[in-house]
């Protein structure tokens, strides 16, 4: 979304610095942050309000109207993982670990993604606290595997951390692809994500 917003602005498709973009997850509202020369320095995105009910995520539970913030998931191997599930327009599972780099995400990620408790599969995030307001995370995205970053995932992890009393309403989350700033606004209940979007190259698709 940050890249899309910057692309539209840099290519002259819009002169607005605040956009409303229709997506499958609803209306997303990116805001372009400019320097004195008018160049984009970062993009702040309104990710909307998180959802907690099992039916909204969705997660198969005994009570579909209950929250799914404390779920125990058992694999065929007998391994168990405790995690929190929420939706930020798509489903996310957050698991706290002591060392995200040592976690076997390549093996565990696809098993949790396709766990029977998740009828539409789920994005899996392993998270480590590295400071009073800083987190480190890695992601296994449903249908994609391990990725360098996940914007909705970072929002879900931040909300989970706030709800579980790990940190306050603002945090920095470090992902393999870079850092994001997250804020969960109590007035609107919306999550805001701020991060860079950089031009890399142009290309031509030859069909």
Image (tube, grey):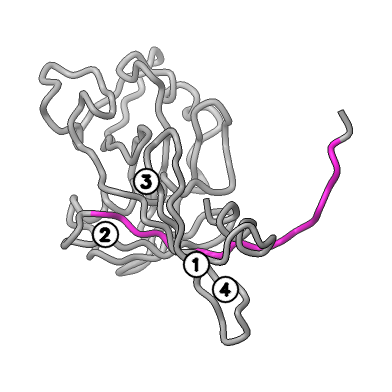
Residue 184's label in the rendered image is: 2
Q: Mark 4 points at which residue?
A: 41
Position of residue 86 measured from the top left corner of the image (x, y, whole percent): 27, 37
Residue 97's label in the rendered image is: 3
Q: Which of marks 2 and 4 is nearer the N terminus?
A: 4
> Mark 3 packing: few (<14 Cα in 10 Å), some, or many (20+)?
some
Residue at position x 51%, y 65% from top? Answer: 16
Q: Name the residue under label 1.
A: 17
Q: Count of labels shown?
A: 4
Secondary structure state at the residue bearing disc 3:
loop
Residue 114's label in the rendered image is: none
Q: Which of marks 1 and 4 is nearer the N terminus?
A: 1
Q: Spatial distance from mark 1 to mark 2, Cα to Cα?
A: 21 Å
From the image, state whether disc 1 or disc 4 is nearer to you.
1
For the C terminus, the quadrant is top right
Secondary structure state at the residue bearing disc 2:
strand
Q: Do the residues labelled 2 and 4 touch (CB within 8 Å)?
A: no
Between 5 and 146, the residue placed more toward the observer is 5
């Amino acid at each position: 979304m940050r890249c899309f917003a910057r692309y539209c602005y840099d290519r002259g498709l819009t002169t607005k610095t605040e956009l409303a973009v229709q997506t499958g997850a609803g209306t997303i509202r990116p805001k372009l942050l400019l320097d004195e020369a008018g160049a984009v320095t970062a993009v702040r995105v309104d990710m909307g309000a998180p959802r907690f009910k099992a039916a909204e995520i969705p997660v198969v539970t005994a009570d579909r109207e209950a929250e799914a913030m404390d779920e125990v998931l058992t694999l065929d191997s007998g391994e168990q993982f405790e995690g929190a599930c929420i939706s930020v327009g798509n489903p996310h599972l957050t698991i706290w670990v002591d060392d995200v780099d040592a976690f076997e995400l390549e093996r565990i990620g696809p098993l949790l993604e396709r766990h029977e408790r998740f009828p539409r599969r789920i994005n899996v995030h392993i998270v480590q606290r590295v400071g009073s307001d800083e987190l480190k995370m890695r992601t296994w995205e449903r249908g994609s595997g391990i990725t360098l970053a996940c914007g909705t995932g970072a929002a879900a992890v931040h909300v989970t951390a706030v709800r579980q009393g790990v940190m306050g309403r603002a945090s920095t989350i470090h992902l393999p692809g870079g850092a994001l700033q997250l804020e969960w606004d109590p007035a609107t209940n919306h999550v805001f994500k701020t991060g860079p979007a950089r031009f890399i190259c142009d290309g031509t698709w030859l069909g």
